[in-house]
Image (tube, helix red, strand yellow):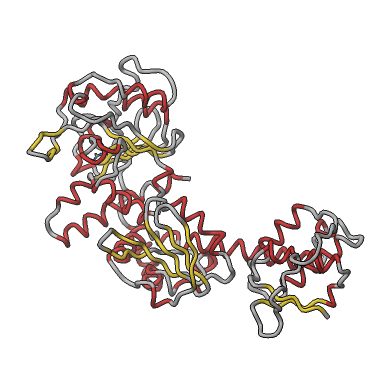
Amino acid sequence: MRVVVLHDGNDLAEWRTHARALLADGLLPSDVQWQVGEIAGLLPADASPADDKPAVKTGTVPREFLSLADTVLAHADARRHAVLYRLLWRMTHGERHVLGIASDDDVAWCEQAAKAVRRDMHKMKAFVRFREVKQLEGSVFIAWFEPSHAILSRVAPFFVRRFAGMHWSILTPARSVHWDGQTLTFGAGAQKGDAPNEDALEALWLTYFANVFNPARLKVQAMKNEMPVRYWKNLPEAVLIPGLIRDATARMDAMVQSAPTTPKKHIPAPVERIAMSLPDGSIDALRRQAQQCRACPLWEPATQTVFGEGRDDARVMVIGEQPGDQEDLAGRPFVGPAGQLFDRALAQAGIARDALYITNTVKHFKFEPRGKRRLHARANAQEQAACRPWLLAEIERVAPKAIVCLGAMAAQAIFGRSFRLLEQRGQWIDLDDGTRAFATVHPSYLLRLPDERARHEATAHFVRDLSMLCEVMT
Ligand code: URA
């Protein structure tokens, strides 16, 4: 009997090195015992099989097997190393095509294990909830999650893509992962108490969840399948679920009895798609040409044109008003305080900034110098009109399915001057070309609210508005 002790029971490279050496020595699967961890007396200092042996050629195994093994090794079942070695042995001893036999016991076991790992990854992507921890250098978002399998390193890249601009950590019992905006690092495991458990974000999320819950669509079993009860304890919204389920019948009766809502009035879009001759070419070509724009006097004192950024095939376009001081210096929209608030609200609504195209109605910073400071000044009607061809060109090239206007200036650029933000906020309006659009408040309005409670509520409302975009994101 050969005892193999793995340092990391989830690592394909390490398992593969041992498996190759065992094959080369002709070790039958029944003669191998697999263990994980440094168990005293079992792991000699030079235990790594490849260290002192010449590389042994054991023939190639299908790429499909390596990919399956990579996923199966993340499973928590202690039998995984042995089952994989048995499969490898069989593939290299006359059963090369065994992977194609779905009814084979070893193959079926591995497929089940791989499926469980993939499902666990899906659940982690869906159920991780970050909580904000304010620090002197800015906010850090921390989440606690208890995966069933060793999936952290597999799922971490998803969170990097999704929350690239935030600093976050995900803590699990076995390991933790941290993103500082640039580097991903893995550390030791943690305890649930290491993650904060309540804050403002949680209140916002609860409000959002209660608002999007549709009693007419309640299917308790489906809900439990999709959101298994074992995850509920870490989900802030789970405290609402029993109450929402209890009240669902009454709420649905009320929905049935209430008067039908009148269809929303169609407001023809005044956005004249191509009013003036537009620069040709891609968004990048437009961006380069806009750097030379002299259509109004704002270009002169400004540092640069702040053109839109993001995916040129985005399903959603966000239109703000005009760049501020920091946007002017960085040459990018929404990177200053309003942009940071916007990023947090997007994250709370579950929307990735990098899936959007973000631009402004006016592309230059307008300001009045006060000593060393540059005070924001609102672009007037002529300046807005001068910038209009660029905005129209961006809409035409990106061809988004939906547009969200942040603030009255953007709303009036899209819906016309009669648009009233206070009355029509958060209502989908069909534009003439089939694009859907709605307007909400500008994040700088939220920053200006003096009363903390009012700001909190207004921010929750803003997050709810942004959540309307989820339906068009996929
Ligand atoms: N406000 C805006 O409308 N746009 C920006 O890019 C920044 C602040």
Q: Is residue 461 left or right of residue 15?
A: left
- Most distant residue in the top direction: 277
Q: Position of residue 356 (x, y in %)?
A: 40, 41
The residue closer to the viewer here, 302 or 251, is 302
Q: Is residue 130 left or right of residue 43?
A: left
Q: Position of residue 330 (x, y in %)?
A: 29, 38
Instruction: Tell me: residue 304, above or below residue 194.
Output: above
User: Residue 473's quadrant in the figure?
Assistant: top left
Taking the image as four quarters, which one is ligand 1 found in? top left
Q: Is residue 74 left or right of residue 59?
A: left
Q: Who's the residue at 32% across and 31% down the image?
A: 307
Q: Position of residue 31 (x, y in %)?
A: 84, 77
Q: Who's the residue at 71% across and 82% down the image?
A: 42
Instruction: Tell me: residue 354, above or below residue 190.
Output: above
Q: Who's the residue at 28% across and 50% down the image?
A: 340
- Most distant residue in the bottom direction: 41
- Most distant residue in the right direction: 94
Query: Is residue 470 something one can see in this rendering?
Result: yes
Q: Position of residue 79 (x, y in %)?
A: 72, 75
